[in-house]
């Protein structure tokens, strides 16, 4: 019988006091002097959302993260102290050494927890940007100003936050350009957004990972030290290494299905471009149109690289003739895109089947969680558009 330890649910409201509570709880959880901790947004805690299915966890587990439930009911991912430490050390090694961190992400998500743990591993808690009233670029600049001079500087953002900083103007961009690395994850990073950031002198590092891998474990397409990424003949991506979770609390069936042979079988498709991993999006999101398979993420990369496209989300819509049709919601920038040129670019790069038969310009994409496009909401939005043009 495995040794067990208690699990404590910690409600957090994003305030400085709640960060202090989390720092204390994570310190005790990882050094073994206190219970394991499940950080939970105070609002979710009040309505009973994401309540854990048990009040004890295996002894090696230090943190439990409740997933967003985007693919079904929420799961409770168990992360050991060893896995969290391995992730923090590999990140520090990849970025060039220990540094001070600014926390601008919610701490009930793995990315926010990891900012706290990486900062503690480097010797000091993170500087908090209070985002209880939403993310504000000016607030990020003020938080940056509280970092000590001379130390390496790191932060972790989602693409939406990065875009808002770039749109804000000189002060916020200047603050961000002073960082040694800006991790950007949680959603795909559009090439145009990355180019804007790098043109402003910002060192962007695109990350890929999930709660089951202690957050980001592939940086700019290169796995972190100790992380083994493999793509099987069907294109399904699996991950191995010391950063893997211990499974799902109270769900042995889901654990057995996802953690196979010491590896985590993701729901994503991928391919190798030389030594770099290219993630093609979720296998469940693949669009089958006229008998041909189209990866939305591949189409999104082409669309996002076109002039006049600020952000994009591609989904499949039911169609009586084709089974599904490819549809795109596009947030325009400047004068907006030339839609015929956009179609031509997709046709040339991904083939005729991948050309969106329905495209709609929108003011913003519906988002969920920490900034991922809400594909269900996007599909509902596009389904209300008129008859699609022929491709």
Image (tube, rainbow, N blue to C red):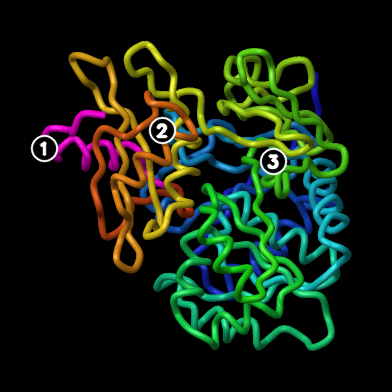
Distance (Cα) linking label 2 and label 1: 22 Å
Q: Which residue is the site of mark 2?
A: 347
Of labels 3 and 2, earlier in sequence is: 3
Which of the two discs, 3 and 2, sits closer to the camera? 2
Of labels 2 and 1, earlier in sequence is: 2
Q: Which of 184/387 is in front?
A: 387
- At horizontal 32% and vertical 50% (from top left) the residue drawn is 330
- Quadrant of the image for the N terminus? top right
Across and down, in percent, residue 194 comes to 58, 60
Q: Which residue is the site of mark 1?
A: 386
Across and down, in percent, residue 271 comes to 66, 28
Mark 3: which secondary structure?
Answer: strand
Q: Which of 275/251 is in front?
A: 275
* Disc 1 crowd, CA 10 A, few/some/many (<14, 14-19, 20+): few
* Disc 2 crowd, CA 10 A, few/some/many (<14, 14-19, 20+): some
Does 347 sit left or right of 33 as displayed? left
Of labels 1 and 3, earlier in sequence is: 3
| Figure check: 238 above or below 164 | above
User: Does the stretch in magenta take in 383?
Assistant: yes
| Figure check: 259 above or below 148 | above
Residue numbers of the magenta segment: 373-391
Q: Which residue is the site of mark 3?
A: 6
């Amino acid at each position: 019988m495995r040794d067990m330890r208690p699990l404590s649910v910690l409600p957090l409201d994003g305030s400085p006091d709640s960060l202090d509570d989390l720092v204390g709880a994570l310190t005790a959880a990882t050094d073994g002097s206190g219970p394991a901790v499940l950080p939970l947004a105070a609002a979710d805690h009040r309505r009973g959302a994401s309540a854990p299915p048990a009040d004890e966890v295996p002894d090696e587990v230090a943190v439990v993260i409740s997933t967003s439930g985007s693919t079904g009911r929420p799961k409770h991912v168990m992360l050991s102290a060893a896995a969290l430490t391995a992730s923090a050390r590999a990140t520090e090694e990849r970025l060039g050494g220990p540094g001070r961190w600014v926390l601008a992400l919610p701490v009930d998500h793995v990315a926010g927890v990891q900012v706290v743990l990486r900062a503690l591993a480097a010797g000091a808690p993170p500087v908090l940007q209070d985002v209880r009233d939403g993310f504000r670029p000016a607030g990020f600049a003020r938080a940056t100003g509280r970092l000590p001079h001379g130390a390496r500087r790191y932060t972790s953002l989602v693409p939406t936050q990065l875009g808002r900083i770039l749109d804000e103007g000189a002060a916020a961009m200047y603050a961000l350009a002073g960082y040694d690395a800006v991790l950007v994850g949680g959603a795909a990073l559009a090439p145009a957004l990355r180019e804007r950031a790098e043109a402003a002198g910002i060192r962007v590092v695109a990350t890929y990972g999930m709660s089951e891998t202690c957050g980001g474990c592939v940086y700019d397409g290169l796995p972190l030290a100790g992380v083994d990424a493999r793509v099987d003949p069907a294109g399904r991506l699996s991950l191995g290494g010391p950063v893997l979770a211990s499974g799902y609390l109270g769900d042995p069936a889901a654990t057995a299905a996802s953690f196979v042979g010491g590896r985590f079988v993701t729901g994503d498709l991928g391919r190798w471009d030389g030594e770099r991993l290219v993630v093609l999006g979720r296998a469940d999101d693949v669009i089958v149109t006229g008998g041909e398979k189209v990866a939305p993420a591949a189409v999104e990369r082409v669309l996002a690289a076109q002039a006049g496209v600020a952000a994009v989300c591609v989904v499949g819509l039911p169609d009586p003739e084709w089974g599904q049709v490819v549809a795109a919601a596009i947030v325009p920038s400047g004068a907006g895109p030339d839609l015929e040129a956009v179609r031509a670019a997709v046709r040339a790069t991904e083939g005729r089947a991948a050309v969106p038969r329905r495209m709609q310009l929108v003011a913003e994409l519906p988002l969920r969680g920490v900034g991922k496009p809400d594909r269900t909401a996007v599909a509902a939005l596009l389904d209300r558009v008129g008859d699609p043009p022929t491709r």
